[in-house]
Image (spheres, grey):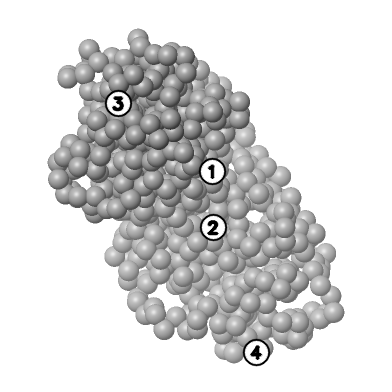
């Protein structure tokens, strides 16, 4: 039954190992073929690597996939998802044979690419190449951060590793380069990846576009690099895994030479084995090479299943041992144990919200403060009560106000809650996702709003995965000033509001900013982006506006007209809310009653009942003006056919922020003029 192809060594050194490996191969081939869609070649090639990792190295418990100190596995090459699904089924996770047969079908738990929260045993959502490697960096960061917080001499309750598989495509993507550079700099010694060096992409040989010395690149990043010459050599694979586990000062990369589609007679080592089914004839031919009955589909030999489940049972003993050790820890450190359980449960510390400050104009010089500055004060107040909160900025902490006072930095030598991501927004976003997926940590990350473009793929995956990541995006408009249009976001609010599952909040002042942070912390089933100003904004007097301020509703009546029925509604967000309030006064002087609606989050407002939304924006009042220093795209939903949107549908200008706001029409006088004209037209 020994399968050979080309110059490859035998699949394994024993018939049982070979049977366990070939079961993964045949399940993967059959599932892709039945779906008539998918990527069979990489699961076939990496089946030995998966068997050795799951049977001899990885610490997991299929009966409790979420126990805190398990090893994490990340399939960064998510297109090879059938490799992971086959392994999860064989190892005893709640992934049935029927689930494998439903690969890539509607509402199955075996989608085309792995998704966290859908399939037991899947740690992060992967597929967009390079993201998984970035997620794994975040997982390793969380492990170190939690170890420093909770471990005590003689009690190592946080002590696990992160393992992953990545591909040529992963390493071509920029996010992987950013993440690998950061991992090496931080000396994340518990991070280990096997690189599937198969020389094939969808278009053909990697030589078409990729010829770098990957090992030397990773050595330059500060990684420990080893090589396995043949992916079918299970003893060499085990040695490489052991060497990686023994290396504690550097992350490890195992460069493993494989043959995609092994041992397909016609499609091995070709692009045809990458992104398409092998075809019925080739599946039969490959099974014949393996010594399997070509007429049987989704066959799982009893000996193979027994061996996989026995390996899973051996690994589960690590969980039992950890439970015993945690019980001893809890007896000696009951308060820490309670904090540990609370952190992993996702529950917020009792009374944490009492730390949120209220801002009064009298307390701030000039009665105004930039919302980024107010955010920094709120963040620091919350962090003192909420120890799971950790994060930092992409080299912009002095500008984004996201440093935690009294906390040390997270580095190769120190472990604190202040992170310095460097100029690596994309890696920051991917790592934040990994930190959130790990559990026990509540991450936030900051950059200028315009540079959310660099991290958008990671933000999208956070939304898809429902990960509670918090983004602090500052310098939110043309109001940032002289840096000019390259740094002035225009379309960003509209485009991010369009992303399902992402809550975008643009607060109007310091007090709305405080409420925005409360909403963000309490929102535990998806990401939140808080969009903040560079320039100072007037503080809305809590004595006047405090009772009606309802950021959690997304939109609310901030100031009512002096008469019972307003003639016009002014809807504004962020820095333009104070402009709308001033315009309201000008309109009142002209005998035009106006209502001001603050709309910090269209996302949250849209989630409210129709009754509430109609109360804030009565359908009978069609004279409406939206005011936002950004693209007007999307505002027609709120102003209706009879309304007008004051915005900016071109790029900005390099000039002082106040000059920009005036030149582009964000003044009380211009708003009042537009509103007055609108009322007269309706009249």
Q: Residues at badges 4 and 3 in contact (C-beta under 8 Å)? A: no
Which residue does the image show at 37% across and 72% down from the upper left? Answer: 214
- From the viewer's perspective, is residue 401 above or below residue 205? above
What whole-number distance in Å separates the C-alpha atoms at marks 3 and 1?
34 Å
Q: Nearer the viewer, mark 4 or mark 2?
A: 2
Q: Which residue is mark 2?
A: 126
Drawn side of residue 640 relative to residue 94, left or right:
left
Q: CA distance from mark 4 to mark 1?
A: 44 Å
Looking at the image, tell me whether mark 2 or mark 3 is earlier in sequence order.
2
Extreme residue toward the front, this view: 683
Residues at marks 4 and 2, CA–CA distance in whole angstroms: 29 Å
Q: Is residue 202 visible?
A: yes
Question: Mark 1 sits on what residue?
Answer: 501
Residue behind mark 4: 266
CB contact under 8 Å: marks 2 and 3: no
247 lies above or below 561: below
Instruction: Give x and y (percent) for residue 379.
Output: 35, 28
Please tell me which of labels 1 and 2 falls first in the chain: 2
Q: CA distance from mark 2 to mark 3?
A: 49 Å
Of badges 4 and 1, nearer the viewer stands: 1
Mark 3 highlights which residue? 583
Q: Please, what secondary structure does the residue beneath circle 4 have?
A: loop
Q: Position of residue 582 (x, y in %)?
A: 28, 24
At which x and y percent is residue 12? 65, 75
Instruction: Locate the C terminus and report the quarter of the image it occupies.
Output: top left
- Mark 2 vs mark 3: give the one in front: 3
Q: Nearer the viewer, mark 3 or mark 1?
A: 3
């Amino acid at each position: 039954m020994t399968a050979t192809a080309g110059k490859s060594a035998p699949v394994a050194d024993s018939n049982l190992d070979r049977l366990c490996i070939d079961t993964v191969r045949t399940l993967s081939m059959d599932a892709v073929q039945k779906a008539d869609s998918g990527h069979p070649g990489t699961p076939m090639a990496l089946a030995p690597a998966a068997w050795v990792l799951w049977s001899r190295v990885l610490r997991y418990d299929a009966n409790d996939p979420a126990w805190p100190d398990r090893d994490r596995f990340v399939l960064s090459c998510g297109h090879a998802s059938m490799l992971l699904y086959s392994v999860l089924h064989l190892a005893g996770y709640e992934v049935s044979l029927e689930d494998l047969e439903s690969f890539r079908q509607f509402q199955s738990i075996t989608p085309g690419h792995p998704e966290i929260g859908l399939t037991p045993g899947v740690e992060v959502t992967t597929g967009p190449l390079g993201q998984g490697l970035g997620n794994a960096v975040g997982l390793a960061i969380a492990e170190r951060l939690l170890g420093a917080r909770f471990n005590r001499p003689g009690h190592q309750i946080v002590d696990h590793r992160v393992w992953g598989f990545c591909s040529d495509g992963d390493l071509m993507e920029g996010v992987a380069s950013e993440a690998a550079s950061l991992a090496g700099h931080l000396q994340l010694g518990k991070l280990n990846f096997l690189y599937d060096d198969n020389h094939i992409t969808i278009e053909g040989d990697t030589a078409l576009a990729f010829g770098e010395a990957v090992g030397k690149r990773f050595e330059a990043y500060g990684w420990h690099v080893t090589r396995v010459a043949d992916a079918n050599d299970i003893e060499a694979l085990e040695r490489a895994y052991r060497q990686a586990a023994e290396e504690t000062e550097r992350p490890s990369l195992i460069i493993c030479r494989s043959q995609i589609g092994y041992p397909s007679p016609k499609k091995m080592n070709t692009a045809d084995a990458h992104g398409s089914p092998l075809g019925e004839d080739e599946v039969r031919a490959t099974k014949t090479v393996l010594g399997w009955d070509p007429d049987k589909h989704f066959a799982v030999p009893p000996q193979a299943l027994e061996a996989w489940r026995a390996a899973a049972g051996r690994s589960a003993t690590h969980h039992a041992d950890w439970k015993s050790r945690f019980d001893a820890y809890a007896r000696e450190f009951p308060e820490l144990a309670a904090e540990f359980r609370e952190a992993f449960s996702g529950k917020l510390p009792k009374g944490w919200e009492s730390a949120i400050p209220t801002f009064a104009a009298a307390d701030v010089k000039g009665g105004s403060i930039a919302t980024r500055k107010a955010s920094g004060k709120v963040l620091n107040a919350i962090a003192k009560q909420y120890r799971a909160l950790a994060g930092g900025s992409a080299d912009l902490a002095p500008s984004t106000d996201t440093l935690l006072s009294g906390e040390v930095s997270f580095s190769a030598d120190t472990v604190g809650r202040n992170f310095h991501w460097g100029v690596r927004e994309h890696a920051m976003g991917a790592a934040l996702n990994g930190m959130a997926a790990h559990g026990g940590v509540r991450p936030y990350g900051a950059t200028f709003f315009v540079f959310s473009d660099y991290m958008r793929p990671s933000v999208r995956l956070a939304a898809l995965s429902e990960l509670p990541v918090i983004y602090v995006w500052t310098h939110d408009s043309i109001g940032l000033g002289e840096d000019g249009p390259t740094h002035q976001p225009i379309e960003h609010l509209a485009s991010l509001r369009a992303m399902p599952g992402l809550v975008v909040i643009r607060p109007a002042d310091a007090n709305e900013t405080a409420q925005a942070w409360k909403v963000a912390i309490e929102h535990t089933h998806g990401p939140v982006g808080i969009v903040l100003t560079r320039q100072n904004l007037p503080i809305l007097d809590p004595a006047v506006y405090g009772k009606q301020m309802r950021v959690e509703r997304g939109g609310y009546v901030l100031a009512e007209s002096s008469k019972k029925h307003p003639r016009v509604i002014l809807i504004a967000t962020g820095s333009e809310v104070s402009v709308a309030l001033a315009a309201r006064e000008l309109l009142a002087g002209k005998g035009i009653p106006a209502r001001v609606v603050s709309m910090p989050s269209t996302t949250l407002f849209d989630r409210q009942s129709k009754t509430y939304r109609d109360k804030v924006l009565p359908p009978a009042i069609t004279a409406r003006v939206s005011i936002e220093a950004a693209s007007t795209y999307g505002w027609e939903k709120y102003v209706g056919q009879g309304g007008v949107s004051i915005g900016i549908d071109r790029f900005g200008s390099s000039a002082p922020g106040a000059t920009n706001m005036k030149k582009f029409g964000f003044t009380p006088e211009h708003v009042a003029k537009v509103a007055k004209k609108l009322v007269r037209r309706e009249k």
